[in-house]
Image (cartoon, grey):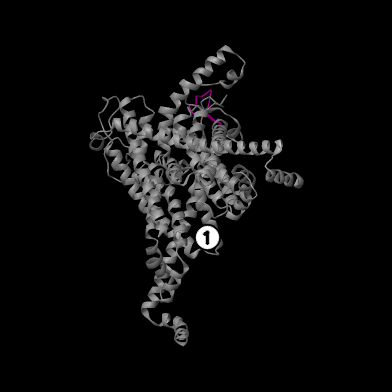
């Protein structure tokens, strides 16, 4: 038996060379390997192509306006002889950062809460349903969030939050409400856009957090419970510190998504290019500016300025996402 | 520290608790209750948001739904409420998604196979995996810009094909990722058994590993479809939109997401009604693909 196996192994390579059928299998294998390899290379080429096309397309605008492209908030596509067209992207860039950060401010504590609830406190009978609900929230397309924000959230916010605040601000000029309402426009503003963004990134962060919490070794958890810790003490002193590094990665993954989100924000942010004066002011993000203006761009310089904005967004999201992946490691999605 | 604890334990045994220990225990318990309460509230907030969004969708979508939605094309502005439909957009969306899926699935499965089967210990594979993960969450509007530069500018106009390619770029990373994860689940014994029979590596992958991972691969495709069919941003500049019925892949084409983006921001009540109906249709397609996909994934894991 053993002898037979040895002789088969020894005969192996020889037989492949000998028989015509086997060599055609070898060729097929090589072709298959080549196909798989080229598919992977197509992916790499796509990302490289994306970067190059944005850099090339945006270069005319950046070289024309220089540093002012990043520092000025004047966005004037309709040029006249005395007032030539001008593109300064500070407004959208700041709008992108503010909406994403405010969204994270809401989403992060909620996501941690949901993940902890699912891992530690959730009764087994409803755990499955809560998990499905979170998945559904992640599955709803961006444009549907936009519809909801535009037709449900923004009017509600205007009527029930901004109108009362406006009244208070009128009674107490210079007070807190007055400051809050500086530059306030309608229910479609930076704040409501951030709320929508928070709901959108919430399920992604919560899912990753849940996986991270589940990755804490059982004996570590049980040891702390064995010492008489309450569930709060176990989570706050043992589990969260244990996943610290990956947790930062999970948060950045959410941030990366929030930075690049397009349709929902475009629907609700109000789309003004000026530097936002307050959180209730209308604004714009890089993605919403591109979505709004690209199809109707008036001239080459306008198109180029929008692509340059895209390049800026690419650099920002790429760095955030790359950092997130490095922190998370390769195991978790 | 140690003395306090022994003291407490002794007192506990004697049935008498010093006041400070009772206080401390009560405080720890209270903090814990508050914590449990806060995490439950966080979960409740998320579920409330989901219910509210689904409620608006169903309430506003169903009230505008009728048979003509499927049989008549998108109306011009200013027509009576209830007239016109979404036929051209539905057919357009199906066409773009079918072409996009064909591309995304073939490239995604091959690339995922390469990463899982040929990529071990390979530096290039680590880079590809990393870039794929980044591409997975890259802003889709940028992919729209890229497809515009690549496939719209040279041909002087948007087309269904350009839209399909843009969607394929969005979806391929999803398929690649799931394919790699699924293939890695297969045991090495299965591979070794195939090789022991004299089959080459490629043959083992094609006729054993792929076949064993069939359900998982379908799941990957469904999740990709769920991601693709709701994407709007990549279609804005690539398909150019079309008010009329068209099945020509080289011409501008209508699609559901594009129609929503156009109609929702108008002041026309009939257009807004159709935007809600289109949102309902898309959400229904995406969510059912998601649920079926997850269900299949769970079923195959249990076996």
Does the rendering let one see residue A305?
Answer: no
**Which chain letter goes with mark 1?**
B
Which residue is nearer to you in this view: A139 or A189? A139
Taking the magenta stretch, the answer to whether it contains residue A298 is no
Query: Which x, y percent locates residue A145?
Result: 43, 35
- What kind of element bears circle 1? helix
Q: Which corner quadrant of the image does residue B109 belong to?
A: bottom left
Query: Which x, y percent locates residue B210?
Result: 39, 63
| Residue highlighted by disc 1 | B125
Does the rendering let one see residue A206?
Answer: yes
Residue name at image x 37 percent, y 64 percent: B211
Quadrant containing the N terminus of chain B is top right
Q: Is residue A56 above or below residue A284?
A: below
Q: Which corner quadrant of the image does residue B15 belong to?
A: top right
Residue name at image x 33 percent, y 25 percent: B268
Quadrant containing the C terminus of chain B is bottom left
Residue name at image x 57 percent, y 12 percent: A171
Span highlighted in magenta in the image: A77-89
């Amino acid at each position: 038996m053993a002898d037979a196996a040895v002789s088969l192994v020894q005969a192996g390579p020889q037989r492949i060379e000998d028989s015509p059928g086997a060599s055609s299998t070898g060729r097929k294998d090589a072709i298959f390997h080549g196909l798989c390899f080229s598919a992977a290379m197509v992916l790499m080429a796509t990302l490289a192509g994306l970067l190059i096309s944005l850099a090339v397309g945006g270069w005319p605008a950046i070289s024309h306006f220089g540093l002012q492209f990043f520092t000025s908030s004047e966005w004037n596509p309709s040029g006249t002889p005395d007032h030539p067209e001008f593109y300064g992207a500070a407004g959208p860039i700041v709008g992108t950062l503010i909406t994403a950060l405010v969204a994270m401010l809401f989403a992060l504590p909620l996501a941690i809460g949901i993940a902890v609830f699912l891992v530690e406190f959730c009764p087994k009978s409803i755990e499955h349903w809560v998990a499905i609900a979170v998945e559904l929230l992640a599955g709803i397309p961006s444009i549907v969030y936009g519809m909801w924000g535009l037709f449900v959230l923004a009017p509600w916010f205007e009527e029930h939050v901004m109108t009362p605040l406006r009244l208070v601000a009128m009674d107490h000029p210079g007070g807190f409400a007055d400051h809050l309402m500086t530059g306030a426009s309608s229910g479609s503003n930076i704040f409501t856009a951030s709320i929508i963004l928070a709901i959108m990134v919430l399920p992604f962060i919560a899912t990753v957090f849940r996986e991270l919490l589940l990755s804490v070794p059982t004996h570590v958890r049980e040891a702390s419970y064995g010492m008489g810790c309450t569930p709060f003490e176990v989570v706050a002193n043992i589990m969260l510190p244990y996943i610290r590094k990956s947790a930062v990665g999970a948060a950045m993954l959410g941030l990366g998504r929030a930075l690049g989100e397009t349709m929902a924000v475009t629907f609700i942010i109000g789309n003004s290019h000026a530097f936002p004066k307050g959180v209730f002011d209308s604004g714009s993000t890089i993605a919403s500016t591109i979505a709004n203006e690209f199809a109707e761009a008036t001239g080459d310089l306008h198109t180029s300025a929008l692509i340059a904005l895209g390049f800026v967004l690419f650099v920002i999201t790429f760095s955030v996402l790359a950092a997130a992946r490095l922190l998370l490691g390769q195991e978790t999605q | 520290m140690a003395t306090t604890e022994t003291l407490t334990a002794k007192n506990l045994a004697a049935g008498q608790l010093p006041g400070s220990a009772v206080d401390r225990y009560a405080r720890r318990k209270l903090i814990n209750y508050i914590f449990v309460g806060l995490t439950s509230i966080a979960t409740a907030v998320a579920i409330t948001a989901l219910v509210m969004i689904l409620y608006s969708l169903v309430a506003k979508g169903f009230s505008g739904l009728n048979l003509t939605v499927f049989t008549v094309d998108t109306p011009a502005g200013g027509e009576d409420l209830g007239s016109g439909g979404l036929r051209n957009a539905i057919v357009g969306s199906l066409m773009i998604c079918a072409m996009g899926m064909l591309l995304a699935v073939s490239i995604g499965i091959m690339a995922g196979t390469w990463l899982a089967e040929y990529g071990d210990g390979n530096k290039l594979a680590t880079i590809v995996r990393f870039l794929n993960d980044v591409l997975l969450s890259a802003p889709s509007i940028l992919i729209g810009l890229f497809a515009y530069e690549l496939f719209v500018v040279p041909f002087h106009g948007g087309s269904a094909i350009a839209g399909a390619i843009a969607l394929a770029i969005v979806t391929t990373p999803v398929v690649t990722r799931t394919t790699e994860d699924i293939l890695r689940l297969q045991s090495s014994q299965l591979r070794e058994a195939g090789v022991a029979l004299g089959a080459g590596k490629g043959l083992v992958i094609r006729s054993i590993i792929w076949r064993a991972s069939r359900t998982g691969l379908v799941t990957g495709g469904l999740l990709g479809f769920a991601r693709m069919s709701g994407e709007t941003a990549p279609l804005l500049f690539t398909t150019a939109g079309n008010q009329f019925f068209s099945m020509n892949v080289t011409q501008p084409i209508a699609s559901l997401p594009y129609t929503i983006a156009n109609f929702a921001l108008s002041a026309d009540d009939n257009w807004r009604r159709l935007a809600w109906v289109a949102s309902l249709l898309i959400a229904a397609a995406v969510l059912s693909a998601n649920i079926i996909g997850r269900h299949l994934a769970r079923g195959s894991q249990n076996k």
